[in-house]
Structure formats: structure tokens, C-alpha cells
Image (cartoon, rainbow, N blue to C red):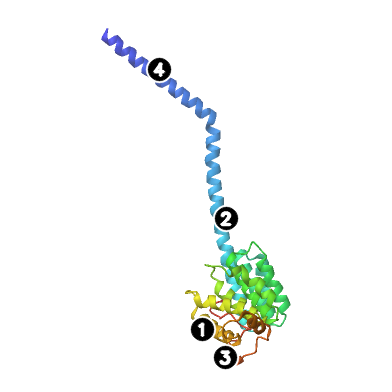
Amino acid sequence: MANDDRRSEQFVREVDEELRRDQLKALWNRFAPVIIGACVLIVVITAGYRGFIWWQELRAARAGDRFMAALEEIESGDRARGEAELKAISEEGGRGYAALARLRLAGAQAASGDKAAGLQAYDAVVNDTSVPGPLRSLASIRGALIALDIGDAAGAKERALPLNEPGNPWRHAAREILGTAAYESGELRQARDYFAEIQQDAESPADLWIRSGMMVSLIDGQLPAGGNPENAAEGEGEPAGGSDPASAPDSQNPTPEAEIPPQ
């Protein structure tokens, strides 16, 4: 009787196992194409992604080589050929080097005397949302400097003001531009405030801190003693060059070379 029970239990187990195998086989036959297709798709997507990354790195490396070669040609005297290569890079060199090439070309236009074209080129970089943020900020600073150079104080303020924010790495250069623009416009108190901000910022570069201190002293010498607002308004209406020009830094070049990378 006991042997019959054991045989019965073994038979039931064998039947259950056979049923499970049949069920698993049926599931595999039903979903095998989907599973295999999903695996193949994952492999293809992964390979495609890695290939795209490799292609981008290769393209960036080639653009970098072309960019450096173009700069070397310009420095060696073949300016036309170098600038032609920069123009080609700006159109097909990817986000980073294309933007650098555009900045370099804008600087070349301004340096050649066509400041209006250079300013327009810098503004085009600023307004291009595909350009990385730091390069757009650099274009704003350089555009503001050109605006100062051509006497457009309002344009310089408009370009530099958005960068005058706590934590912005370009705030020091922006404050000097804003202060210089206000000074050239005869807005002495506002100019003093911008230069004082540079003095109060512990992260201000040393040379910029020194120049801002000189400007604060210069402006204090032009404002009436005691800070009478009415008299101050009269002082602000006077030409900005009322004091000894030898005591003031060159307001046409407010930003030190350390603040802006070479073009």
C-alpha cells in the first residue's frame, strides 16, 4: 500500500513537471520573437549610441586640429587663408569650435577697423541659443567693450548688465564696463556704485580691484564734499574728464587681459 502511494506521488510529480515544461515551451514559442527582437534592439541602440559618441569625439578632435592650424596660419601672416578656414569651421565644426571660430572672426573684424561688423557678429553669437553659455557670455563682454570703444555707452550697459549677478564669473568685467559706461555718461554716483561693488567683492581680481579703487578716488574728487544730492547732480552733469586724466585708468579698455581669454 505504501509503495502504491509513493508511485502515485512520483507519477503526479512527473505529470506536473511535464505540464510545466509544456507551458514554458508554449510561452517561449509565443514570445520568443519579441524577446529576441528586444535583445537585438538593445544591442543595436547601444552600438549606435557608442558609435555616435565616437563620431562626435572624432569630429571635435578634427575641428580642434583645424582651429589650431587656422590660428597658426593667421599668426604666420597668412591671414586670408586662416580666416577662410575659421569661417569653414564656424559653419561645420560643431557647437564648441564653431562658436570659438565665430568669436575669433568677430574679433578680427573689430581689429581690422570694422567695429560695427564685429559688434554685429558678437551679438549674433549671444543670440544663438545653441552656443554654450560661457561663450555667449564672453561674446557679451567683448561686444560691450566694442560698444564702449565706439561711444555707445547705452549699448555697453545693455550687454553687460545681465552678467552683473552674484556668482556669475563674468560679473567683475561686467561691473567695470557698467561703471565705465556710467562714468562716460556723466552718471558719477552710479559709476561709483559699480566700482564700489568691485571693491567689496572678495573674489575680484587684484588688478581690477586696484583700478576700481583708482576710479572710486577719482569720482570722489569730482563729487562735492558731504554728498549733497543737488550738488552731486550738478557734478554728474559735467564732462567725465573734469579731473586729472593721468590719475584714471584707461576707460576705453576696462577689462584686463586676465578677465578675457585671448581671441
Query: What residue does disc 1 label?
Result: 210
Q: Can residue 204 be seen from the camera position used here? A: no
The amino acid on which the numbered mark 1 sits, given as a three-letter code, is Ile
| Structural distance between the alpha carbons of marks 3 and 1 | 12 Å
Looking at the image, do the residues carrying marks 1 and 4 touch, with CB atoms under 8 Å apart? no
The mark that comes first in sequence, 1 or 4, is: 4
Q: Nearer the viewer, residue 95 or 30?
A: 95
From the top left corner, tell me how far across and down residue 108 is, in percent. Answer: 67, 79
From the top left corner, tell me how far across and down residue 215 is, in percent. Answer: 57, 84
Helix, strand or loop for disc 2: helix
Q: Can residue 234 be seen from the camera position used here? A: yes
Residue drawn where x is 52% and y is 28% of the image: 29
Report crowding for label 3: few under 14, some 14 to 19, many 20 or more residues within 10 A (C-alpha): few
| Structural distance between the alpha carbons of marks 4 and 2 | 53 Å
Looking at the image, do the residues carrying marks 2 and 3 touch, with CB atoms under 8 Å apart? no
Residue drawn where x is 56% and y is 68% of the image: 165
Q: Nearer the viewer, mark 3 or mark 4?
A: 3
| Structural distance between the alpha carbons of marks 1 and 4 | 93 Å
The amino acid on which the numbered mark 4 sits, given as a three-letter code, is Val
Query: What residue does disc 3 label?
Result: 247
Helix, strand or loop for disc 1: helix
Looking at the image, do the residues carrying marks 4 and 2 touch, with CB atoms under 8 Å apart? no
The mark that comes first in sequence, 1 or 2, is: 2
Looking at the image, do the residues carrying marks 1 and 2 touch, with CB atoms under 8 Å apart? no
Looking at the image, do the residues carrying marks 3 and 4 touch, with CB atoms under 8 Å apart? no
Query: What residue does disc 2 label?
Result: 52
The mark that comes first in sequence, 3 or 4, is: 4
Position of the N terminus, as image quadrant, is top left
| Structural distance between the alpha carbons of marks 3 and 4 | 104 Å
Badge number at residue 11: none
